[in-house]
Amino acid sequence: MGQPSSDLLSRLLLNLEPWRNARTWRIAFSGGLDSTVLLHLLVHLAKTQSLPALSSIHVHHGLQAAADAWPLHCQSVCDALGVPLQIVRVKVKAGASLEQAAREARYAAFSDVTLADDLLLTGQHRDDQAETLLFRLLRGAGVRGLSGMPTQRPLGQGRLVRPLLDVTRAELEAYAQAHQLRWIEDPSNQDRQFSRNYLRHQVMPVLTDRWPQAQASMARSAAHLREAQGLLDELAQIDLTQAATPSEFEWLGLPSLELAPLMKLSVARQRNLLSHWLAPLTRLPDTDHWSGCTDLINATQDASPVWRLADGELHRSGGRLWWLSGNWLRTPLIDSPWQEPSRALRLADNGRVMLIGEAPAGPLQIRYRQGGEVMRLADRGHRDLKRLLNERAVPAFVRGRLPLLFRGEELLAVANLSGLDGNPQEGWRLHWDPLHEDQGLR
């Protein structure tokens, strides 16, 4: 192998400078042109620079017969370069978009292997960035989508970095040919039925024939839009300081926002704030589906509206917006009496409940609200549970999940609600942990 281009090496080293102290640099190695050049460059860089340990990972999707030979090719390349290779086989879920499903399976595998202080390096280049911008533009993406692929982002417990986004495909091809590198040509990359391939083979050549700097200009536009998105994120963070106030029900462990500060904002700022807040929680909806957000915010005070999103639901209750997902969307059931009140009771899809202090005389049972329950209070006599929950402004979605302690038909306690959760004279109270770790909530 000849010596790599000093220009490419210096650009790569500059782009990776912030992560020189990482534990591992792992290359996402498909065996294609981009990742082959990236791997080759890094191996040569390691000969003259003190770098983190290099390794590579090949994800085998099993979607076409030709791909069965690729792990062997990748292994031979890595063996020749002295780089350890991990081969991961994934199952791609059936769906409307095979491209998207394969990408999700691939990045899930990448996420699993990326530990704290690890870097996963991918080989996307400037031409890919231009295609991404054009593809998302045609799908009606907003500023976040049109900002293209970020140079780095969180992945697993570490980070994903794309150090070749300022390098063209032509530069990579010239480098590979000059160094007589062998790489895999994926037959599916020629299939014009895939939108990306259609853009790459049918559209981009026409654009660059008319405007030779088209790809560079698109990449520059993506950079401008990333900067604009950064400003929108800063604005969202400012607005969040007003809306992300503590709730009386912090013990629920649920993300929530105060509604009043949100309603003072323009519709555009409301959407910007909610997009920023929801991004780590769920896939964001398309433009048409955002009407559900308007209905949620503008509902009457006595309503309990719900906005259903891809990975959960946004509820409005008690002057706040609440994010619910995982077990919070399942109806909890009690399947047996509380045989050992001295021990915590696991609740199906609802955490666990426990008695703190000496348990009252039994037999005891945990139930959920059905309607019509009455509770005897020492200083107020018998009171409807519904009224008591209204007085405490308990969010509507919590009321059917609150563990209730019964002795026969007598309601003794309502978990976690001060004054209703036990008997101070007898020295016990009922505590509910809705986010017990065994639930596996999102």
Image: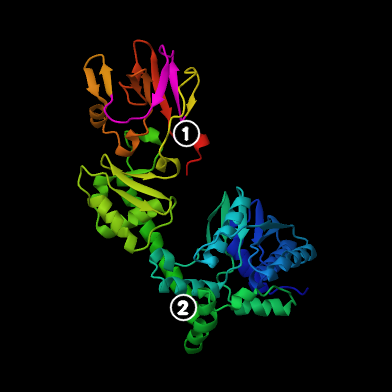
Percent position of residue 259, x then y: 27, 46
- Disc 2, SS: helix
Q: Nearer the viewer, residue 183 or 45?
A: 183
Q: Quadrant of residue 120?
A: bottom right
Q: Is residue 377 visible?
A: yes
Which amino acid, by three-letter code, is at mark 1?
Ala
Residue positioned 55% across, 69% down in the render? 165
Residue positioned 54% across, 79% down in the render? 192
Query: Is residue 349 inside the magenta stretch?
Result: yes
Q: Is residue 39 above or below residue 214?
A: above
Percent position of residue 243, x then y: 30, 46
Query: Is residue 224 inside the magenta stretch?
Result: no
Q: Nearer the viewer, residue 303 or 274?
A: 303
Q: Quadrant of residue 254?
A: top left
Circle number at residue 266:
none
Category of crowding for the residue at label 2, using alpha-carbon neighbours closer than 10 angstroms: few (below 14), some (14–19), many (at least 20): few
Q: Is residue 62 left or right of residue 284?
A: right
Say which residue label 1 marks: 348
Category of crowding for the residue at label 1, using alpha-carbon neighbours closer than 10 angstroms: few (below 14), some (14–19), many (at least 20): some
Q: Is residue 51 visible?
A: no
Q: Is residue 82 left or right of residue 314?
A: right
Say which residue label 2 marks: 217
Residues at marks 1 and 2, CA–CA distance in whole angstroms: 55 Å
Which amino acid, by three-letter code, is at mark 2?
Ser
Residue positioned 75% across, 77% down in the render? 180
- Disc 1, SS: loop
Residue range highlighted in magenta: 347-373
Name the mark nearer the viewer: 1 or 2.
1
Percent position of residue 294, x then y: 26, 55
Chief secondary structure of the magenta portion: loop
Percent position of residue 375, x then y: 28, 20
Query: Most extreme residue toward the bottom, as rendered?
Result: 210
